[in-house]
Image (cartoon, coloured by chain):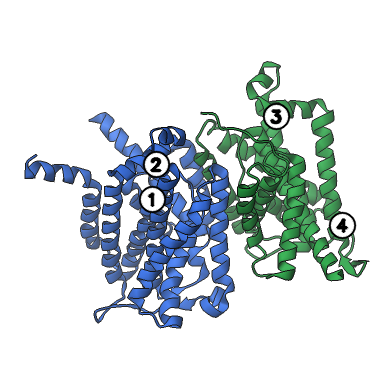
Amino acid sequence: MSVFESLRLSLHANGGVLALAGVMLFLPFLLTSDFHYRVIALVWIFSLAVVGLNILMGHTGVVSLGHGGFVGLGAYSVAVGPVLLGIPVWLSLLVGVLLGGFLALLIGKPLLRLKGHYLAAATLGFGILVFMLFSNEVRWTGGPDGMSVKRLNLFGWEVRGAQTWYWVGAGVLLVGAWMARNLERSPTGRALQAIHGSEVAAAITGVDVAGYKLIAFVLSALYATAAGAMMALMNGHVTPGIGDFLVSLQLLTMVVLGGMGSLLGAVVGAALLLVLPQFLTVVHDYEHAFIGLILIVCMIFLRSGIVPTLHARFRKYQ
Amino acid sequence: MSEFLQFILAGMTVGAIYSVVALGFTMVFNASGVVNFAQGEFVMLGGMLTVYGMALGMPYSVAALFAVVATSLISVALYDFAIRPARGAPVYALIIITVGASILIRGLTKIAFGTGPRDLPPLLGDEPVRVAGAVILPQSMLVIASTLAIYLCLWLLLQKTLLGHAVVASANNRMAAQMVGIDVDVMTRFSFSLSAAIGAFSGILISPITLVSYDMGTMLALKGFAAAILGGMGSPLGAILGGVLVGLSEAMSAGYLSSQYKDATAFVIIILVLFVFPNGLVGKSGHERV
């Protein structure tokens, strides 16, 4: 295989990531205010969590109604660490993400033995439990009023401002997306897809179903925790709402709308769900109802989501 | 001791509501194989629509009837527009659909009736009754009694009437039921509407005690689900027992451990039950067929 050939293959494999990078570079020409930058920065950060959730849902077929809990954990790690424990922000960020992964490992082992509705209910309960913790432990979290977050400071450079977060969010998302894409094409990714197809069949061909599900769960938790920490750092303030049930459902809706298992779909889903309410006030007022409607309509008429559906259509015409 | 009794009474009252939610889960699950995560919203709608009806000037009883009928219709609409078109869909799709329905109902309620909690007047006055050193509201007794009545009526319906037999037959084996001339779709619709009706009815009765707010459904669904699996998913008697047990353990943990974390009890129960008794207390074991 020549250098060019392998380069071509790699380009083909990472086409989605490259397209995303292109959009990230081009988009600032269209953004005219800090507010726009903020919204898109939020899209990148949410997309990161959605890319992670997609590893769990899209590739493995496990529905989680509690990933908001991990988002909240990440957010409160960077809030509580520096303010109450005197840990530097960057270290809190790191510890927070690791904590998210560790918690996922801890609860994932028993939870993932459950299936279908039972697993969904258990994850829902987990999310609510974490939310309860943040609302009730006033001494640590400031309760429902929340607490302020120290800014991230990297080598004397303070990370703040909408434009800065646009690029930081974009960079982290690219890395996350690229890793997810590589995972998808690795033996682990194929094992996860086999589990999605049929757990029994996967087990018969020698796939360690429980083990791989746990891997997917922990990875998705790492992504969600990182996204939560970035959200808190960007906003400079956290409240328990950052990880509530609605956030879990938002993430779920983004996965479903964009397309389960589709990398670009994750970004498209996040963008639609976050940008639309900014322009259509109707959508903003009816946010809960809107999310509910999207979930139902997608599952009935567009079960594979926007991006995979368009992709299939495009192929057909070719 | 009187404190203990007080917790028991409190637990029985909330437990009665969890029983009804669990009963709703069970009926819909038996009829369609779907766990309807919007079950808690039906309880909320019962209370909310009654408040709305009374605000429109209806007398209590008419408003309550309106609420129950409207909630049943919403449930039938949920079946016809969201669940029936997705027949044969994988489990994850059905979960997402009912969760979507739950948040849709919640969102519309929020817009229509606002976010503040609403209140209904108690039916039997608000003078507490003393029982061996503990107090119980007459409304609580009404809630507990009506839950028992609902169970009894349901039992009679399913065991003693032709309609009930048709429901059971459809739940048991769709195709066989169809072959003996039962309209399975109608029976499933009936189960959906009945599960919503009993939910709404209990919602009306519990509103004077717990108030009713647009976002109470998720928690009720979670606890009702805990109750349903504690009793063994699919068993009506199990649903009742499970609800009371969840209510009691919640009241005990609120009383003796932490009132802030009483809501965590349901989650702990879900986890424990699924590991210790995967088929519930009264459930039957089964195998997944490939």
**Image quarter of residue B119:** bottom right
Q: Residue under circle 4?
A: B141
Q: Are marks 3 and 1 in contact (CB under 8 Å)?
A: no
**Cα–Cα gap, marks 1 and 2:** 9 Å
Q: Residue under circle 1?
A: A269
Does residue A239 appear left or right of residue B165 in this picture?
left
Q: Nearer the viewer, residue B199 or A103?
A: A103
Chain B as rendered: colour: green
Chain A as rendered: colour: blue
Q: Are marks 1 and 2 in contact (CB under 8 Å)?
A: yes
Percent of width and height locating residue B19: 75, 49
Secondary structure of residue under mark 1: helix
| The label number, if any, that marks residue B187 in the structure image | 3
Percent of width and height locating residue B28: 67, 38
Q: Chain of mark 1?
A: A
**Cα–Cα gap, marks 3 and 1:** 38 Å
Does residue A257 appear left or right of residue B138 in this picture?
left
Labels 3 and 1 positioned on one and the same chain:
no
Labels 2 and 4 positioned on one and the same chain:
no
Labels 1 and 2 positioned on one and the same chain:
yes
Q: Is residue B121 visible?
A: no
Nearest to the eye among marks 1 and 4: give it. Answer: 4
How many numbered marks does the figure carry? 4
Secondary structure of residue under mark 4: helix
Percent of width and height locating residue B138: 88, 61
Secondary structure of residue under mark 3: helix
- Disc 4 crowd rating (10 Å Cα; few below 14, some 14-19, many 20+) is some
Labels 3 and 4 positioned on one and the same chain:
yes
Q: Amino acid at mark 1?
A: Gly
Q: Residue under circle 2?
A: A305
**Cα–Cα gap, marks 2 and 3:** 32 Å
**Cα–Cα gap, marks 3 and 4:** 32 Å
